[in-house]
Each structure stands twice: as C-alpha cells, then as structure tokens.
Amino acid sequence: MRLGTDPEVEKFRAEFAAFVDEHQPTAEEARERSQSSSDVPEWARTWQRTLFDAGWLLPGNPPEYGGRNATLEQVLAHQEELSRRRIYHSFNPQGIGIIAASILTFGTDEQKKKWAVPILRAEMTASLGMSEPGAGSDLAGLRTRATLDGDHFVVNGQKVWTSGAHDADVLLTFVRTDPDAPKHKGISVLLIRTDTEGVARRPFPSMTGLDDIDFNEVFFTDVRVPKENLIGELNKGWAVAHGSLGHERTMLWISYAERLDDLIRDAPSDADWFATLQMDVQALRLLGYEQLSGGQNPAEISVLKLFGSEAVQQAHWHALDEQGQAGLVHPARTAPGNHMNNDVFGASWWERYARSFTGTIAGGTSEVHRNIIAERILGLPR
Amino acid sequence: MEFEFDEDQRLLQQAVRETLAKTAGLPEEELWATYLALGWLEAPPVELAIVLEELGYVADPTPFLATATWFAPLAGRLPSGSGTAVFDGAGRFVLDADRADEIALLTADGVVVVSGADVTAERVATFDTRLHVAHVTAGGVDATPLAAGVPDLALMGLAATTVGACRRILDLVVAHVKQREQFGVPIGSFQAVKHKAADMYVAIARARVLAYFSALTIAEDDPRRARAALMAKAAAGECQQVVQRNGAQLFGAMGFTWESELHTYLKRAMAGNLLLGPASVHRKSLLNMEVAAL
C-alpha cells in the first residue's frame, strides 16, 4: 500500500491533457446536441475519430484499435482526466464499451476490421439487443429465434429497452439458435444491420419527458442475416454476454464516481447527507482501485455496481429533496453547460434523480447483484 | 496510488490470524505478553490497522488498542506496560484508564504523561463487560487544564477494530443461516436473508477501505489524514449500524441469548461506534472541512 503518484502515469496524464487542450472542439463547433445513445452529431464523430487515430480513444487497446497498449493505471488516469473536464467519453457509449469490445474479444480479424473499427471511429453506430419482454434479469430466458437457412440466419422475435436502436446502424443481437439445449447453451450473437428487411424499430419515450427518445422496441420478422455476422461461436453466446458485460462492468464504477463528483460540485450543502456523499465517492474509488489490482473474486464487481449505483441514487434523492418546492421545476439546468458532456448529467434535479434508476436496474438489478454477493462471495445456498 | 497489501502485509495478516486463532480464550496477561513478544505494538499505521482489525475480530480483552492508538500518538512513545490517553478535554469515558500503567494527558500546555497510579479512574459499567472504560476524576490531573484533540490514529484504531468485529458478526451470521433450517430449507436460501447479508458485506467493504486509507494517510503523513480519519470513524459507525441491525435480526432468537457468542461482537462493534463519538458527530466534523479529491 502506498499513496503518491507514479511518474509514468503522470507523464501519460499530462500528454493526454495536452492533446485534449489542443484538439477539443469549441462550443461553437459542438452546438448540435446528441438525441440518443446512438445519435452522434458530426462534430462528435470527428472528435471520436481524432481520439481513435491518436490512440486516445481507448488507450488500453493496441494502436490499430484506438489505443496505445496503456496499463490499467494509465487507463484510469485517462478516465479521470475526461471526468474532471466533464468530457463524455463517447456519444455512442455502448458502441465502444460493449459492442466493439465484444467484437474485439470474440470476433474474427475480418469482423474486427469490418465492424469494430468503424464503430470505434464513429463511422457506424451500434446498439445492444439483449433484453426482451420476457428476458430482463433472466437474460438467458430470451426467445428471439435464429434458424440457419443456407448461408443466412433467419431471425424472428422481439427486443426491448434497446437504447438508441432507432439511430443505430447495427444491433448486436442475442438470439436463440438451439431451442432444445439448456437455456444458457443455445444462445448466439449476431450483428444485424438495422436497414435489413424485416427489422422494425419503435422508439418510445422515458418517464423524463416525451422528447426523451432513447428506448426502442425492435421487431424482427424473417430477417435474413449473413452467416458471417455471427460473433463468437454458434451457441456460445452466453460467453459473449459475460465477456462483454464483464468488461463493461469492470469500469462501471468510474461512471458512478463521476456522478457523485458531479453532485459534490453541483449541490454543495452543509447537511448531513453531503458528508455521506463525500465518504461514498472516496470509498467507491478505493474499492475500484483495489479491484483493479486484481486477484479478487470476480463477484466483487457486484459490490462496486450495487454500492456505486445505490450511493448515486441516495445522494440524488437528497439533492432533490433539499430543493424543497424548487425541486418541482423541470426541465431545468442544474450544472454549468458543457458542450463536451452529455446534457442529461446537468438536467433538472428531478431528472437526475429519476435517471439514477438506470444504475440500479440496467446491467443487473440491485437485487440480482445482492444475490450474486450472497451466493458467490458469502456462499449462501441458491 | 497502490491500494492493496504488499507481500509482507499479507503475511502479517495471515500470521496475526493464526496467532489469534491459537490464543483464543487465554487469560489477558498471556495474550498481552504474546502481542508484546510479537512486536505488534511497534507496528507502523497500516500494519497496526491489520493487527487491530483482527483484534476486533476476536473482541480482544487487552489494553492493546488504547496503548497503541491513544497513548502512543500523544506521548510520542510506547508506555512501559500499558497506556491510554485523555484527549477529550474532560477525562470522560477513557479507554482502559482504570488499568493503564501510564496515562498521557493532553493539556493546554502540551502533553503530560503521568503514572496510572497517580490518577483516580473510576471504571464505568458498560454493556461490553470485556471493555474497560473509566472516568478520570482526580489526582495528578487537576493541576493541568485538559484540552481536546483526538489523534487521527485513535479514530483509525477504533474504525479498524469495529470493522473487524463487524466481519466476525457477518461470519457468524453466514454460518448460522447456512445451517439453520426452517420450512425444510436452510434460511440462507431465502432472498430476504441473502439481501440483508449482502448489505452487511457491502457496508463492511466500504468501512474497511476507508479505515485502511486513513492508516495509509497517517503512515505517509499525507495532508488528507484528518479528513480520512473522520471518514474512517464515521464509516465504521455506519457499518456497525447495518451489521448490528441485520446481524441480530438474521440470527433470530438464538442471537438474543447470552449463550450465543454473537453478542460479544455486537457489543464490541457498538462500543467502537460510540467511543470518541458516533458516526453522525464525525460526519458533522467532515462538513466543516474543505472538500478534497482522492
């Protein structure tokens, strides 16, 4: 155990900071706002490409995939620098964080070139088709079918909660390819272009407002998907789900720490909850650092997810509550405008609180993570 | 920053656990002699936190905590024998004052060390019958106006001890709910039980990292040490609240008996929260400090 900074990491941080200072778009250039998690305005595409080409998009990746083979500590410094400047990492977050990451882990070289690189360079946007009306926490219960017909899969079924699908070029879609196998063993993963015949997307608004259109229902009717769009092995989709979500979850705590940091800046208070907030963000970072050092039970990620998302929710409740009647106002701005950031992080106090439920529901509900902690860490019977 | 134990620290933790597993139930004097022989009192802050967490795990009956984290930081040395300190400005609820060989007094003129025999200390009856707490009332004390100023190490020490006691409670509870059957199944298979246990685990994880961060900032005399110590003490108290509530609940009627050992650790954890002020007091102090980044 030691405090203090690693000179190599600080050099790396300074280099990235200088790059951002030089290349970051101006407020004037970045006027157009993103409308969904797969809607990336032209300026943001150019910016993401600039980061990719310089190896600053995902520094832990090799150069051909937008990185520079950085260490975990350096990747963390990169995240911290983005967070400190309130720069949203990507306006297609699931595209780079889950879909491209899955293709890079499980795809063929050709798939990496054809799909992962364009997604990372924001030439193509991607959404994630996992949840279904009957498959949320129980993802393995998914029923969208894909049957092989010559050199195509034929897909039929429905996804829901597919963020940004109406703006996405491709969907990473989890489908059942072996209906007779045990439910975890008959799943495969297909990349489906949204302009394929038989794909219908129906976006619907969230509780935060009729103009907040991100969620979609996606219907597949006899959709023919080329065989070569299979990501990973046939019927081994569960491994992809674990791998890609696992990757995402490893770093998820950072986004919770960012939201807590936002509140420390946006809602200073001398009430008791503000002390809890400071302790929560400190403890979350320490747990995150501890986890990055590795060697722990992988289920410890559930501790970070559960603790981080619930701390964010609780703090946002207090921030809203402290407003009293003024907390009724919506829409509203509660943080200084920052053209590089996602606008929702500075939305009304009510909206910020309402959005905290995406943390405790998406990516495994808090209840699922409590089960994981109880069963896989404490060893309680299933 | 590296926030994991190095090899030596891991070995120390293992050694302390093995020692305490073997010495369980020995008389206080023998325990004390063992700790002295192993050099635990000389441990630097992070290593001391490792020892204290394990001593909390066994609800240690010796004056180790007061000697290492109350007397030592005030006097700037270890006592001959055991020690404690008066730093609350009043001499109330002083850990081990009734049995300490030396007592460090924080006064308006600085620190004065007196022999335990020179003060009158009246032991207070508390719910934790293995804990020694006393009011220091007279003798050498009245010559000096006492001052208030709690060392960071004392807050960290209570925090680490409390985390250890909470860990023990969780271990006991987990063992109980795995073995106790109702409705034909172990009660640990019920989600209502699992979720309470998971919340205990998370509360302990949060308090544990803040206790060790406090120890680390003391070890390196980092400017964040005062903040870190307040956070550690507050988090340990909050952890105690969750662990007591869920732990006592999950243990059911058995946990309410004197016969079950659960109460030993519930009491030690509760005392750890109350001594030197509960979580709410330290949260309040925290609000008076500048917000600082990790």
Image (cartoon, rainbow, N blue to C red):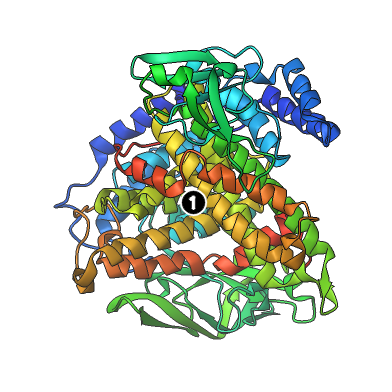
User: Residue B151 location, x and y as percent?
Assistant: 45, 26
Q: Residue at x 69, y 48 (%)?
A: B265
The reply to whether residue A56 is in sight is no
Q: Measured along the vertical axis of the image, is residue B53 above or below residue B46?
A: below
Residue ID at (18%, 47%)? A26
Seen in the image, is A190 located left or right of residue B276? right
* Image position, residue A108 (x, y; %): 63, 54
Residue B28 visible in the picture? yes
Q: Position of residue B72 (x, y in %)?
A: 54, 18
Tag 1, which secondary structure? helix
Q: Residue at x 19, y 67 (%)?
A: A332
Image quadrant occupied by the C terminus of chain B: top left
Quickly name the residue at label 1.
A253
Residue plotted at (49% across, 66% down):
A360
Residue A358 lies, in percent from the top left, at: 44, 68
Q: Nearer the viewer, residue A46 or A295?
A: A295
Dot 1 surroundings within 10 Å: few (below 14), some, or many (20 or more)? many
Q: Is residue B241 left or right of residue B21?
A: left
Q: Give the residue type at disc 1.
A: Trp
**Depth check, front residue: A279 or A116:** A279
Quadrant of residue A157 in the image? Answer: bottom right
Residue B200 in the image: above or below residue B68: below
Instruction: Give the chain letter at badge 1.
Output: A
B256 and A333: which one is in front? B256
In front of the other: A292 or B245: B245
Query: Left or right: where does residue A313 sit relative to residue B166?
Result: left
Residue furthest to the bottom:
A221
Give the total number of marks visible in the rendering.
1
